[in-house]
Each structure stands twice: as structure tokens, then as C-alpha cells.
Amino acid sequence: MAKVAFNTLGCKVNQYETESMMAQFDARGYETVAFTEQADVYIVNTCTVTNMADKKSRQMLSKAKKMNPTSLVVAVGCYVQAAADSLEKVENVDLLVGNTDKGRIVEVVESYLDDHVIPDVTDLTKYRTYDEMWLTHTSGHTRAHIKIQDGCDQFCTYCIIPFARGRIRSRSSVSILEEVKGLTEKGYKEIVLTGIHLASYGVQFENYLLIDLLEELDQIEGLERVRLGSLEPTLVSDTFVKRLGKLRTICDHFHLSMQSGDDAVLGAMNRKYSTQDYYDAVTRLRAHFPMCGITTDLIVGFPGESEAQFANTLAFLKRVGFSQIHVFKYSKRDGTKAAKMADQVDGNVKNDRSKRAVAEAEALSGEFGQKNDGRKVSVLIEERITGEQGDYMVGHTTNYLKVYLSLDDTLKINDMVEVQLGKPLLDGFYAKPLRG
């Protein structure tokens, strides 16, 4: 039995696609082993979102060849799509596979091994086909990430993804519903919808958008939770939120892309909304989901960002009251407009702003935790861990609070448990199950 190993860099979409590729190899009779073990084939699902991501991708490809010099090392995905010419010169890489061929990865690998067939990397600039990939199971046993959309038409000035993933394409609802029903029948209780630009799902269809899909998913028997990946504030209209508020399965956790809390910086980034638009979207969500978790991404040190503009961002973070913020220091990506902009921010300044933003994010998370103190909520148990004070079962609430439960013989992974939240910790809560 041939052995195959995988390494995944980057986003949840990449993780979904890796699990689908694993399933393809498994169906063909390959044994999947850890990336640190000897394998016959190494698949590195690359990321190209920053120059550093490119570097990490090259490092993983080199590591694979060192572990087994006679192996087939395959670079797959976004870095290949964005820079195939430069990757062809990397001596540790045997085969390049673009994003459009992930759904037939075994066929591509075996054609290369048998006849040295090398597929072309498809030009995605005019590509409009959604490439089907499927999951029948995942490495976890409680929630499953489902890819429903690919590509992006936004062309933010810091982002290479429209060139690596192409223009927007949406998966058919029939295909999505079939996959979700299959996973639900196998016991998965939570589905997380992912995509490169999830808010654009369905725009090329006739009268069928993301909210229509959510309403159909809500009818699936046995499905208990649907969690949304990253959304754009421009999607969050009054009509969208009113329809969303009627769904039994939707999780009250919304990751709204922000990137900056200053309008001038948002304009330089080519984001399609203002801070007021963003705040209005949050207000609409909280009107229907009063205890919802609002999470976001923040880029500090974007070219030209002044201290005053950064101060505006810090003030906006407080105004919104996020439950969690992922803070990133701006990192150049060759091939983007932002990489060529004047007034690149000094690295020390970026480090300082990052520390200040992280401190504010932690304070806001603490405030959100205090608001949830004592609430009775449901928790989906996802794993068992060993902590400093013993063993715990760990899971999340619908609004994405992490919860620790003292080990109990009656608690099992994939249980949905009603609990009362105790005092908040730095990264979650201790809680007690409610019984009888």
C-alpha cells in the first residue's frame, strides 16, 4: 500500500480541500500518514496570501523531499496558481497542481507516476466553473467545514487571492444539501459554511442567494447548528437579518470582515464599505441576536496608516464591542497594489500597534465574557484535554465561547449539553452541566 502525507497552509477552504483530497486517496487504497513520517507521495496544499506564506510553502516542500528524497513531492493550490513559473525552478518540487485540479488529485498524481503527464495550471481570469469536491467524513467528529463558494471579485489592494482563486463561482444548492445531509446522517451536528468570499454566494444564479441556501439547510432533520464563515457587512441588510433571525439552526456568531476602523484606510484598501456601514450591520445583527458574538480581522500598519488613523481604529473597536479580534501586521504581497504604495509603515511601528490592538482585543473579549457570565446555553463537546488542574471536556456555545467542563463519565464527544456558564477565563469559561 502506497503512503501519502499532507501538509496544509492557509485558510479553512484549504483545510476542506485537503480533507477532500485525503478522501480521494483513501478511496484509491492509499494509506495516509503524518507529514513527519516517510511517505511515497507528499502533498503540500500551499498558501500565497503573503510573501511569508510563499516562504512557508517552499519550506514545507523542501522538508518533504528531505524526509524521503525518492518521494513524489506535489505542490498544490494557491501558490502554484499565483507563481507557477517561479515554483518550477524549485528543485524540491516534482509536480505542480493548480486549484482546478484538486478534485482529481489522484488521477493527476498517478498519470504523472505512470506516464509523466504534467497538467497545465489553468488560467483563472475567465474561469467560471465551480470544481466539485466532497467530504463524507472529517478528521474531527463534531463539526464539518463545507465549501460552498470559490473565487473573489473584490480586488482589495493588499490581496492576491483573486489571482490565485479566480473570479467568484458558487456551488449548486443540490450538491451542498446532499453533502450536508450525508454528514448529518453520520452524526455531525454542526456545519460551518466556508468560501473565499462567502457573501457573494449565488450572485450568478437566478433568484438564489446565501439566505435561500440557509433556509433550505434549516430544514434538514438532525442538523442542529449552521455556522457562517466570514461575511461582508454589505450583505447584512434588514431583509437578510430578518430572514436569518427566523432560522432554528443558525449560530449567533458572525465573523464580519473589517480590516480597519478608519474610513481613509478602508478606502486605500479598496474595501467596499465605511465604518458607519459596518456599525449599522452590527446593529442589525444585535437587534435579532442580542448575545451574538461578533468577531473580525484587523490589519495594522497598512501603508500610509497614520497614528491618528490607528487611534480611530482603536476607538472603533471599542464602539463595536467585538467578542474576538484576529490582529495581523500588514505584510507585503508581491503583485498587489499595496506592495507598491508609498509610506510603508516601519516594522517597529507595526509591532507597537499590533501589541496595542491585541491588548484592546483581549479587554473586549473579557467584557463580552462578563456579559455571558451565568447564562444557560448549549455546548457542543468537541474534545477531551488535560489541563493544569485535571482533565476536561471542551466545546463551544453557539456564539463561539469556549467552555470547559469537568470530566464526567456521562459526557461524550459530540454530545450537545445544556450548561450554566461560570466565571469567564482568559480563553473561555468553566461551566456546569444542567441535568434533570
Image: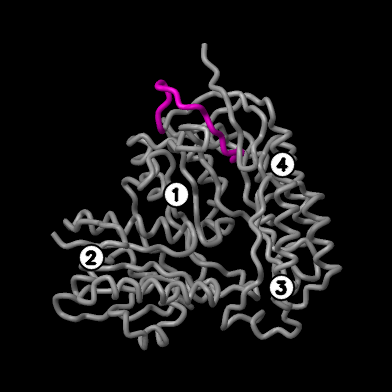
Label 2: element kind: loop
User: Gap between marks 3 and 4, in whole Å?
Assistant: 27 Å
Q: Quadrant of residue 33?
A: bottom left
Can residue 39 be seen in this snapshot? yes
Q: Residues within 10 Å of mark 3 (few under 14, many from 20)?
A: many
Labels 3 and 2: the sequence-earlier one: 2
Q: Nearer the viewer, mark 3 or mark 4?
A: 4
Q: Which residue is mark 4?
A: 366
Q: Nearer the viewer, mark 3 or mark 2?
A: 2
Identify residue type, mark 4. Answer: Gly
Identify residue type, mark 1. Answer: His
- Stretch in magenta: 399-413
User: Gap between marks 2 and 1, in whole Å?
Assistant: 27 Å
Labels 1 and 4: the sequence-earlier one: 1
Q: Residues within 10 Å of mark 4 (few under 14, many from 20)?
A: some
Predominant secondary structure, magenta span: loop
Residue 336 in percent (x, y) is at 60, 80
Identify residue type, mark 3. Answer: Phe
User: Gap between marks 1 and 4, in whole Å?
Assistant: 28 Å
In front: 425, or 173? 425
- Residue drawn at 36 percent across, 79 percent down: 121
Labels 2 and 4: the sequence-earlier one: 2
In front: 83, or 90? 90
Label 4: element kind: helix
Q: Which residue is mark 2?
A: 39
Q: Which residue is mark 1?
A: 145
